[in-house]
Image (cartoon, rainbow, N blue to C red):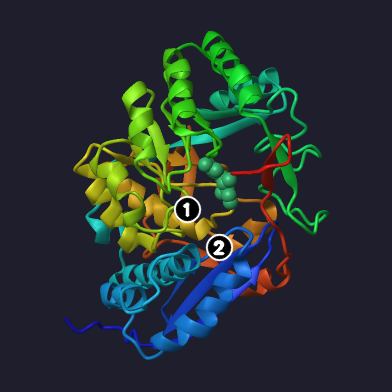
Amino acid sequence: MKSKHDLTITDIRVIVSSPGRNFVTLKIVTKCGLYGVGDATVNGREQAVAAYLKEHVTPCLIGRNAHEIEDIWQYLYKGVYWRKGPINMAAIAAVDVALWDIKGKAADLPVYELLGGKSRKAIATYAHATGSTIDDTLDKAEALFAQGFTAVRLQTAVPGLKASYGVLGDKKDYFEQQSSRPLPPEEPWSTRKYMNSIEDLFRQARSRFGTEVQLLHDVHSRLTPIEAARLGKMLEPYDLLFLEDAVAAENQDSYRIIRDHTTTPLAIGEIYNTIWDCKELIQNQWIDYIRTATTHAGGITALRRIADFAALFHVRIAPHGAPDLSPICYAAQAHLGIWAPNFGIQEFVGFGSDKSNEVFSYDLTLTEGMIHVGDSPGLGVDFNEEAAAQYPYNRSYLPVSRLEDGTLWSW
Ligand code: KDG
Ligand code: MG
């Protein structure tokens, strides 16, 4: 069918800005004036994606028809000898999401309608409660439950360690700009101290909040498979919705060991770039939730495939939703989440800061812990280039982790 709009791509802009934290944003403009936006943020490696997009991707797309999402995806994936990888896949994701945005605008339909329509009224989310003590964490969780959230991820500083995941010593958390530290901050890690303290957090949480609420926890890949198996067993009485990233699974077989020992549901995937990274985990039913993000795993086209594949094996999607994913990523995942028959839950840490809200607008609303997706055409998200220009890029790193004897560990 001939489109009534001329969707020839005439201009592509890559904008790196820092409205509170760094974001890489792609804007694809077509001849008829319709444009779309995509997110290409890779936390701590922003300029690498921007350079890849500018030098190697965007020149190949000028003059192409923006309707040809699938062929452009294949061209940038299969057509490039060097497949996969976080930088490449974030670049593909940004292009893909911007093209879906354009297609929706051209059709005058929200993207979820193009995917097959809504499977639910709104999207369930889980929020974060991270504290320096158990009481602090549980007070924060209580405030979230009072706001209407029904699922909360609990993280607490490990007693005896100077800093812990999400709770850096100076009270800045890792989500924020670490501009006071030109080099990556360092966090100590002790599996023994962690294993000795973690059960208490969940024991106290269940005794304070009862069994109705959903609890989650992110290990952030600090354990070995057999340690993770022990943790899963230890936490079984507290009925987690899922235990996230118990083990870094470059070796997907690691999850078989955990699965053999515990019924605690398992989630992984936020650093995965393609379906190949999670294929064995899914087809062997070693996990329950796959957490790949549109920005890091090749966009809506790729996540739709992962979701459909996962559905065959009773695995649900629970996309990554930390603050380093821009509102454009959130919008893309909201459209996927409202459609996917096997949607599980969306991680949610707020729609952004005051600064990022000057730069991004979106047609999503949160009520009682559920995200409602508006019916604006495309993704309903926009990016204000003038406002972004006030916030130049600010080099920033994620922390690194070391054992107490100095050995480098997974952060
Ligand atoms: O950039 C890294 C963060 O997005 C990540 O540490 C957050 O693990 C995370 C989560 O589950 O949100
Ligand atoms: Mg995580």
Quarter holding the C terminus is: top right
Some atom of ligand 1 lies within 8 Å of the CB belonging to the residue at label 1: no
Closer to us: 74 or 205: 74
Residue 283 placement, left or right of 211: left
Badge 1 crowding class, 10 Å Cα cut-off, few under 14, some 14 to 19, many 20 or more, is: many
Q: Residue visible at 66% across and 30% down?
A: 190
Query: Residue 134's quadrant in the figure?
Result: top right
Position in image of residue 290 (x %, y %): 36, 43
Q: Specify the farthest residue to the top.
A: 207
Q: Which percent across, then down, holds residue 316?
A: 31, 40
Q: Nearer the viewer, residue 240 or 106?
A: 240
Residue found 27% across the figure and 72% down from its top: 70
Q: Amino acid at mark 2?
A: Thr
Between 283 and 270, the one lying in front of the other is: 283
Name which residue lies at 66% across and 38% down: 166
Dot 1 or dot 2: first in sequence order is 2
Query: Is 204 positioned to the left or the right of 296 in the image?
Result: right
Q: Which mark is residue 41?
A: 2
Compared to residue 226, the image places residue 334 above or below, namely below
The answer to whether residue 99 of the structure is visible from this angle is yes
Farthest residue, direction left: 1
- Work out whether 194 lies above or below 186: above
Secondary structure under the numbered disc 1 in the rendered image: helix
Please give left or right for residue 339 compared with residue 409 in the image.
left
**Residue bearing the label numbered 1:** 330
Crowding around mark 2 (Cα neighbors within 10 Å: few <14, some 14 to 19, many 20+) is many
Q: Residue 347, position in %: x, y?
A: 48, 41
Nearer mark to the viewer, of 1 and 2? 2
Callout 1 touching callout 2 (CB < 8 Å)? no
